[in-house]
Amino acid sequence: MKKLLGQIVIVLVISAVFAAILIPSYNGFVDGEENVNKAYAQIENQLQRRLDLIPNLVNTVKGFAEHEKEVLGNIADARAKLAGAGTPEEQAVANDELSGALNRLLVVVENYPELKADANFRQLMDELAGTENRLSVARQDYNEIVSDYNKKVKRMPGSIIASIFNFDEKEYFKADANAKDAPVVDFKGDGK
């Protein structure tokens, strides 16, 4: 009886040690995953703000530049793609497409000095610029949190616990490969 009781105590002590190691590590992964989700929600929040501002900006430009329908159509299409994107990778690609379309809009605006002087347009552009800055910060914060989380998933003993409980690496919010190329601004209008 004493021998059985001793074995039970040993099993309980070993179980308690494993629980003392496992539970905080598991909770760390749960916290890390929630931090990633929270940071990603901030990106989505800023993307939504941007999506909400764009129709007002487009409508303001429409009043001044009726014949620039292609540029405005490209913005609408890119906005729809971003609104429909589901994964961080899809959102990053759609975001880059929308950024390119907005850059082309800014080139068009240069041809309309009266538009640049319009108070509503200036306010919308200021709000869009502020949103772009907040979006940039949110992406940076997200990627830092993902980096911390992914390190936990890859390092020992976290990698063992992560594999047991299916905690996988998270995707970074990456810029499009073409984002490193600066857009060409041509004020001559001849495309050269």
Image (tube, rainbow, N blue to C red):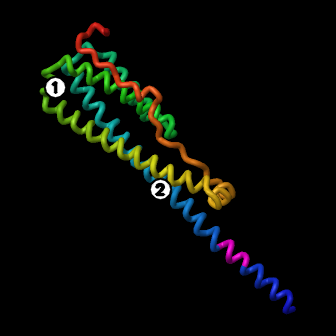
Q: Name the kind of residue labelled 1 in the image.
A: Lys
Find the residue positioned furthest to the top: 190
State the count of labels.
2
- At mark 2, the secondary structure is helix
State if disc 2 and disc 1 touch (CB < 8 Å). Answer: no
| Image position, residue 70 (x, y; %) | 33, 16
Compare residues 171 and 58 and report the one nearer the observer.
Answer: 171
Q: Which residue is mark 2?
A: 35
Q: Is residue 170 magenta?
A: no
What percent of the width, then of the height, locates residue 191?
A: 31, 9
**Counting residues from the N terminus, which is met first, the one under dot 1 or under dot 2?**
2
Q: Residues within 10 Å of mark 2 (few under 14, many from 20)?
A: some
Q: Residue at x 32, y 41 (%)?
A: 49
Hey, what amino acid is under mark 2? Answer: Asn
Instruction: Point out the image quarter for the N terminus.
Output: bottom right
Q: Which residue is mark 1?
A: 116
Magenta residues, start to end:
14-19
In the displayed structure image, the side of residue 119 where residue 153 appears, left or right: right
Real-space Cα separation, disc 1 to disc 2, in angstroms: 41 Å
Mark 1 closeness class: few <14, some 14–19, many ≥20 residues within 10 Å: some
The overriding secondary structure of the stretch rendered in magenta is helix
Q: Quadrant of the C terminus?
A: top left
> At 68% from the left edge and 77% from the top edge, which residue is drawn?
16
Which image quarter: residue 164?
bottom right
